[in-house]
Image: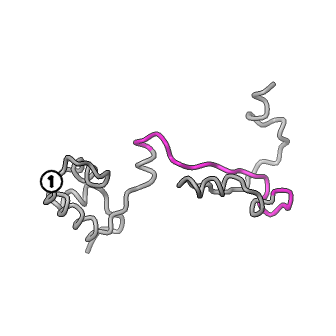
Amino acid sequence: MPPQNPTIRDVARLSGVSPMTVSRVINESVRVSPETRRRVEHAIAELGYVPSRLARGLSRQRTGTIAVIVPDVANPFFPLRRSPGAPTIASSSATRAPISPSSRTSSASSSPIASRGS
């Protein structure tokens, strides 16, 4: 039975190559022989391996996430569904834009972002 969340090391072990070779296959490098590529792709399919977005973001120092923080998503003052804001831009550029209500109740003037311009 395959591991619940297979890692790149599990794929490497099953296909008989190093984790670096698995990485090269995933990133479509030309430095991998067709036979090795076939073995690695077979192991990926067999294990159901999916690259971790978190790991990829850490290695590339870019997560592809835009944070949208509003005081209250139920407040009609923030019409997120009607405005062509971050969620729309994000969907057109393969970027995620989770929307989260903040738990802060203080005014915007005490915000570190608001005070930068002063």
Horizontal relation, residue 29 to residue 74: left or right: left
Pick the quarter of the image with the N terminus.
bottom left
In the image shown, does 102 or 63 lie closer to the viewer?
Answer: 63
Rendering coords of residue 73 (x, y %) = 77, 60
**Image quadrant in which the C terminus is located:** top right
Circle 1 residues within 10 Å: few <14, some 14–19, many ≥20: few
Question: Residue under circle 1?
Answer: 33
Magenta part mainly helix, strand or loop? loop
Circle 1: element type: loop
Left/right of residue 107 with respect to residue 5 in the rendered view: right
Q: Is residue 6 magenta?
A: no
The image shows residue 82, relative to residue 24, as above or below, that is below
Camera-side residue of 71 and 77: 77
Residue reaching furthest to the top: 118
Q: Quadrant of residue 96?
A: bottom right
Instruction: Tell me how many marks there are.
Output: 1
- The residue sitting at 60% across, 54% down in the picture is 90
Q: Amino acid at mark 1?
A: Ser
Viewer-nearest residue: 9 or 31: 31
| Magenta stretch bounds | 58-78
The image position of residue 14, as x and y in percent, is 18, 63
Residue plotted at (32% across, 63% down): 6
Residue drawn at the location 64% of the way across and 49% of the way down:
67
**Residue drawn at the location 84% of the way across and 35% of the way down:** 109
Residue 20, image x and y in percent? 24, 47
**Which x, y percent locates residue 28?**
29, 52
